[in-house]
Image (spheres, coloured by chain):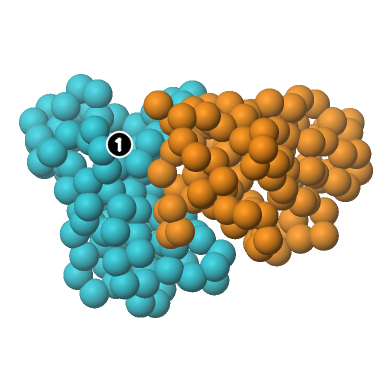
Chain colours: A cyan, B orange
């Protein structure tokens, strides 16, 4: 199985700050990566697919990038509604596997 | 608007069975693969099973193979997960998701399954 190592496990940031979360794939997965946001008691919401494509209705302050087997989710200006747990997902090969999650809190 | 509504969860004893359902609306159900993803309490997300758009192909994670069966009724726009020989480690919120080949784009609200004596 492909391992997705997500970091950091948690972080605290201030409003308007730039936040970056990363996922390291254990092997090449191309652009077959997605990012999700999950708020307490809610189901995950798709943010990014294809490593860099913004899902419908997602604010443009969210962006995705790739460097080799490392993938990043960037929030350009943290807003009050952004805290939650963020997950990456690789769909390159079965079984699809998620990163361990990053808990983002407001400072 | 795409909607996925799960039902059928609850408390079940170890070794017993339970069947989850997911009613889909707002899209042409028969055109899409579907999947179940679960989340144990305070834990991360874990893919469980996927079924192709026409039901001809199914895929499972190793820990549920031989115990869980994913199926669908395209006439009723409904997805199912039959869970047999349930274990305490199957305790989780189960989400019905629409499968876009390499990611899951829409998720239901989730249904809790608790396996305990």
Residue in the image at 56% along x and 64% along y = A95
Query: Picture coordinates of residue B59 (x, y %)?
Result: 65, 62
Q: Quadrant of residue B102?
A: bottom left
The answer to whether residue B98 is seen in the rendering is yes
Chain letter for the residue marked with disc 1 in the picture: A
Query: Picture coordinates of residue B52 (x, y %)?
Result: 60, 57
Residue in the image at 80% along x and 44% along y = B83
Q: Quarter of the image containing the C terminus of chain A?
A: top left
Graded by Cα atoms within 10 Å as few (under 14), some (14 to 19) or many (20 or more), the crowding at tag 1 reads many
Q: Give the residue at mark 1.
A: A104
Residue in the image at 33% along x and 49% along y = A35
Q: Is residue B14 above or below residue B104?
A: above
Q: Is residue A86 above or below residue B58?
A: above
Query: Picture coordinates of residue B21 (x, y %)?
Result: 70, 33
* Numbered circles on residues, count: 1
Q: Quarter of the image containing the N terminus of chain A?
A: bottom right
Taking the image as shown, residue A73 lies to the left or right of residue B47, namely left
- Return the residue nearer the eye: B22 or B53: B53
Query: Picture coordinates of residue B13 (x, y %)?
Result: 88, 33
The single residue placed furthest to the front in the displayed view is B75
Q: What secondary structure is marked by label 1? A: strand
Taking the image as shown, residue A43 lies to the left or right of residue B10, namely left
Q: Is residue A39 above or below residue A63?
A: above
Q: Quadrant of residue A76?
A: top left
Taking the image as shown, residue A107 lies to the left or right of residue A95, namely left
- Return the residue nearer the eye: B43 or B86: B86
- Return the residue nearer the eye: A46 or A80: A46
The answer to whether residue B39 is seen in the rendering is no
- Return the residue nearer the eye: A101 or B69: B69
Residue in the image at 19% along x and 59% along y = A65
């Amino acid at each position: 199985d492909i391992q997705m190592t997500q970091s950091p496990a948690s972080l605290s940031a201030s409003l308007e700050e730039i936040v970056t979360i990363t996922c390291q794939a254990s092997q090449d997965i191309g652009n077959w990566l997605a990012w999700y946001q999950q708020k307490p008691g809610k189901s995950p919401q798709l943010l990014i697919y294809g490593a860099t494509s913004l899902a419908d209705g997602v604010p443009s302050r969210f962006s995705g990038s790739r460097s080799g087997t490392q993938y990043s989710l960037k929030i350009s200006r943290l807003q009050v509604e952004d805290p939650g747990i963020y997950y990456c997902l690789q769909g390159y090969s079965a079984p699809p596997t998620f990163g361990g999650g990053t808990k983002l809190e407001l400072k | 608007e795409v909607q996925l509504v799960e039902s059928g969860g609850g408390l079940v004893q170890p070794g017993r069975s339970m069947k989850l359902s997911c009613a889909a609306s707002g899209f042409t159900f028969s055109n899409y693969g579907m999947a179940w993803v679960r989340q144990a309490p305070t834990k991360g997300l874990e893919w469980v099973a996927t079924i192709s758009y026409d039901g001809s192909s199914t895929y499972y994670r190793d820990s549920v193979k031989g115990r869980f069966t994913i199926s669908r009724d395209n006439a009723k726009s409904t997805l199912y997960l039959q869970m047999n020989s349930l274990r305490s480690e199957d305790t989780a919120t189960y989400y019905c998701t629409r499968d876009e080949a390499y990611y899951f784009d829409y998720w239901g609200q989730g249904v809790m399954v608790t396996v305990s004596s």
